[in-house]
Image (cartoon, rainbow, N blue to C red):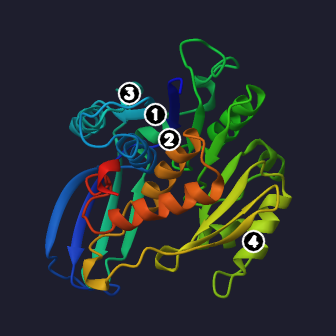
C-alpha cells in the first residue's frame, strides 16, 4: 500500500480539567477532587487519535502520516501542545505560532460519578486560522500531499467551508465533524464525503429536537442534502447509526462497558473520528470503519485525558 497522509486542519487547545463529585449549582462553590492541565482541542485530539490508531504502540512505524494544521500562541501552552503532538508522531510543520494572541483554552468540569463533562472554550489562536491562509492550489501543491482531509468546527466556519471547496475541487475525500454544531449552508453538503455527528449535532443540523430524535430520518435528511459517502450518528453508550449514499445503513452495536470502568468521556468522540479516518484511508467501508471506531472510543473512556486516554492500535 502506498504511503497515505491524513491532514487534520483544526483546533489546538490547552484543557484545564477539574474533577468534581457533582456539578455546582448556580452561585454555588464546591471544592473539586482534582485539577490538571492537559493538551486538547478537537483538531489536535483527532490528529493524535489518527496517529495512535495507525500505530501499534508509541514509536512504532506506520504507512500513514498524520499532519496537523492550525495555530497556537507564542506561550507556554502552545509550546507544550506542539511538543506533545510531535511525541505521538504527528507532523506539526503546519502549526503556526502566533505572537499576537494566546493559545486556545478549554475549561472542562468532569462529574466524578457519571464521567460526563461540561466544557467552555476560548478560541484564542484557533480563531486566526482564516481562509486566506489556504491558497487555491493548497491541495494540489506537491508540498501538501493529502489522502484525506479531516476537519471540525473549532476554527472559523468560513475557513472550513473554503477548505471543503478546495478539497472537493481537488477530489480529496473529506471527513467533517461539525462540532460544536452550527448551521452549515446547504450547498456545502455535496462537498463532504463523510459526515460524523453526535445526537445533539444531528438534531441541530436537521432542526429536530434531541429528545426522541429519529436517527434514521436524520441521517436520510443529511444524505439528501448531498453528502457523497456516509453519515454516521454517534450515540455514546447506545452505540450509533450509519447510512451511506448507496443505500447501506444500520445500527452500530455499542461497546459493553461496566459503569465503574468509565472514568472520562472527554475526547471519546474525537477518538471515534480519528479512528474512522484511519479505517477509511486503509480502505474499509463505512460500517467496518464505524464499528472499529466505536471500539476505539470504548477503550478511550476507560482512561483520563482527552489525548492521554486515546489508545494505541495495539490496545484494541
Mark 2 or mark 3, earlier in chain: 2
Q: Which circle's residue, 2 or 1, is located before the other in the chain? A: 2
Task: Judge by depth and name the residue closer to the eye, 315 or 94.
Answer: 315
SS label for mark 3: strand
The disc placed on residue 10 is: 2
Cα–Cα span, label 3 and label 4: 36 Å
Relative to 183, is 136 above or below? above
- Residue under pointer 4: 218
Callouts 2 and 1 close, C-beta under 8 Å? yes
* Circle 1 residues within 10 Å: few <14, some 14–19, many ≥20: many
Give how far across and how far down residue 87 sits, in percent.
24, 34
| Residue at (58, 11) in percent of width and height | 142
Q: Residue 285: image x %, image y %? A: 64, 51
Residue 125 lies, with reference to residue 230, above or below; the image says above
Q: Residue at coordinates 77% horizontally, 62% vertically from top-left?
A: 222
Residue carrying label 1: 70
The residue where tag 3 is placed is 91
Q: Residues within 10 Å of mark 4 (few under 14, many from 20)?
A: many
Point out the frontmost of discs 1 and 3: 3
> Counting residues from the N terminus, which is met first, the one under dot 4 or under dot 1?
1
Amino acid at each position: 500500500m502506498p504511503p497515505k497522509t491524513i491532514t487534520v486542519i483544526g483546533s489546538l487547545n490547552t484543557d484545564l480539567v477539574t474533577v468534581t463529585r457533582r456539578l455546582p449549582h448556580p452561585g454555588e462553590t464546591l471544592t473539586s477532587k482534582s485539577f490538571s492541565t492537559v493538551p486538547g482541542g478537537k483538531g489536535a485530539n483527532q490528529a493524535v487519535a489518527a496517529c495512535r490508531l495507525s500505530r501499534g504502540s508509541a514509536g512504532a512505524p506506520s504507512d500513514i502520516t498524520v499532519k496537523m494544521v492550525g495555530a497556537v500562541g507564542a506561550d507556554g501552552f502552545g509550546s507544550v501542545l506542539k511538543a506533545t503532538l510531535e511525541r505521538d508522531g504527528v507532523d506539526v510543520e503546519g502549526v503556526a505560532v502566533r505572537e499576537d494572541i494566546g493559545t486556545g483554552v478549554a475549561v472542562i468540569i468532569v462529574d466524578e460519578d457519571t464521567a460526563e463533562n461540561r466544557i467552555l472554550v476560548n478560541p484564542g489562536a484557533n480563531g486566526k486560522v482564516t481562509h486566506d491562509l489556504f491558497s487555491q492550489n493548497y491541495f494540489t501543491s506537491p508540498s501538501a500531499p493529502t489522502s484525506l482531509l479531516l476537519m471540525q468546527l473549532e476554527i472559523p466556519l468560513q475557513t472550513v467551508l473554503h477548505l471543503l471547496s478546495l478539497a472537493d475541487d481537488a477530489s480529496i475525500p473529506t471527513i467533517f465533524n461539525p462540532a460544536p454544531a452550527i448551521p452549515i449552508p446547504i450547498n456545502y453538503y455535496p462537498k463532504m464525503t463523510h459526515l460524523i455527528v453526535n445526537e445533539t449535532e444531528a438534531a441541530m443540523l436537521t432542526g429536530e429536537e434531541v429528545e426522541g430524535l429519529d436517527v434514521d430520518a436524520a441521517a436520510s435528511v443529511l444524505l439528501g442534502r448531498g453528502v457523497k459517502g456516509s453519515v454516521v450518528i454517534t450515540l455514546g453508550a447506545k452505540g450509533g447509526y450509519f447510512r451511506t449514499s448507496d443505500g447501506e445503513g444500520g445500527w452500530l452495536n455499542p461497546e459493553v462497558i461496566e459503569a465503574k470502568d468509565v472514568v472520562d468521556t472527554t475526547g471519546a468522540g474525537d477518538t471515534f473520528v480519528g479512528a474512522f479516518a484511519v479505517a477509511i484511508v486503509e480502505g474499509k467501508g463505512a460500517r467496518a470503519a464505524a464499528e472499529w471506531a466505536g471500539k476505539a472510543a470504548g477503550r478511550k473512556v476507560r482512561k483520563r485525558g482527552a489525548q492521554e486516554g486515546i489508545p494505541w492500535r495495539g490496545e484494541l
